[in-house]
Image (cartoon, rainbow, N blue to C red):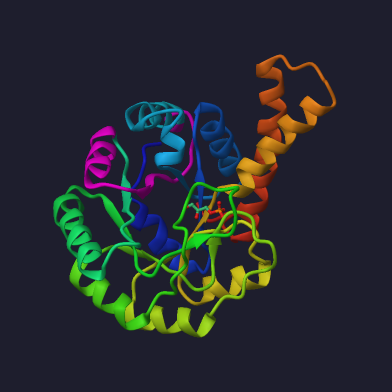
Amino acid sequence: MQFLPMKTLMAHALKHRYAVPSFCAWNAESMETILQVCQRLKSPVILMAGPGEFELLGPASNAAVARALLAKYKVKAALHLDHGDSPALVKECVKAGFTSVMLDYSTRSFEENTTALKKVCRMFQPKGITVEGEIGAVGQCDSTTVEGSRDCRLTDPDEAAEYARITGVDCLAVSIGNAHGTYVKLPQFDFDRLATIYQKVKIPLVLHGGTGTSDADLQRAIALGIAKVNVATALITAYRESLLNQWNAKQNLWVPIAQGAAIKEMARAVEEWVLRLNANGKA
Ligand code: 13P
């Protein structure tokens, strides 16, 4: 298969009441594991990478590896730039073959965020690229993550409507009590706020900080317009804990064997999330 525009996947999800899982993928093994699980479960998927993942494989290599792997699988997938931090990175990712981009200017002023996103939309939507913006700011729960801002600011529904109208973004990341990383206690989502945002913007909404969200909250969020859920920490944690356990048990640490065991743990996390988002059987 070839990568599809992310908005096609999200439109299907909205219509059929599930959310597309969007997983961080930082190397060939993580990408192939995600694709294998999603093919087996017949789930659409979004492979995403941003500045944190580009530490290992830069945009051009990330996209080349992802494309080569997807050619072997029958999976409806998009390749997404997550938390892009500059228009230059957005441009580089589109050039490399990403089918969707997020420019995260959520911590900047409304004017700056709006002007920059409008520009990205005008430039890349005509090329079939999906654009994600964020209004309000999704923060971090702890230091297990590199994503999101230090501070959290809830999304104001009127501001969100204005932002969507001016920029023309295809989808919107919202801040409703969610945060990136490992929650210390269950987050309290503001569902009234979510419902009002969706009523006003009427475009697919994105939940960042998926890790640690309860099943009940996920189902409720999906019913209120969330069409994509970003999950990174759950995968990274499964992988990292396997490596640490192997290290502590002083097992054979031949790197490919140790990583092979770790990636199996990550595969379990991928499967769990596909099922939790009701995405199995949807592709
Ligand atoms: P978690 O790491 O909390 O799952 O969030 C991931 C995310 O939102 C990436 O954008």
For the point 39% across and 79% down, the residue is 197
Which quarter of the figure has residue 112?
Answer: bottom left
- Is residue 132 rendered to the left or right of residue 223? left
Which sits in the foreground, 113 or 63?
113
Query: In the rendered view, would you say 158 is above or below 169?
Result: below
Q: Is-magenta flag for residue 89?
A: yes
> How many numbered badges does the structure rendering display?
0
Query: In the rendered view, would you say 168 is above or below 41?
Result: below
Which sits in the foreground, 123 or 223?
123
Which sits in the foreground, 72 or 60?
60
- Is residue 226 rendered to the left or right of residue 109? right
Q: Is-magenta flag for residue 81?
A: yes
Q: Position of residue 81 (x, y in %)?
A: 36, 45
Q: Position of residue 260 (x, y in %)?
A: 68, 25
User: What quarter of the picture does the N terminus occupy?
Assistant: top left
Q: Position of residue 266 (x, y in %)?
A: 66, 39
For the point 43% across and 69% down, the residue is 174
- Is residue 75 rendered to the left or right of residue 217? left
**Range covered by the magenta-colored residues:** 70-96
For the point 42% across and 62% down, the residue is 12
Question: Could one spot residue 168 in this view of the protein?
Answer: no
Q: Position of residue 7 (x, y in %)?
A: 34, 57
Which quarter of the figure has residue 169?
Answer: bottom left
Question: Could one spot residue 27 in this view of the protein?
Answer: yes
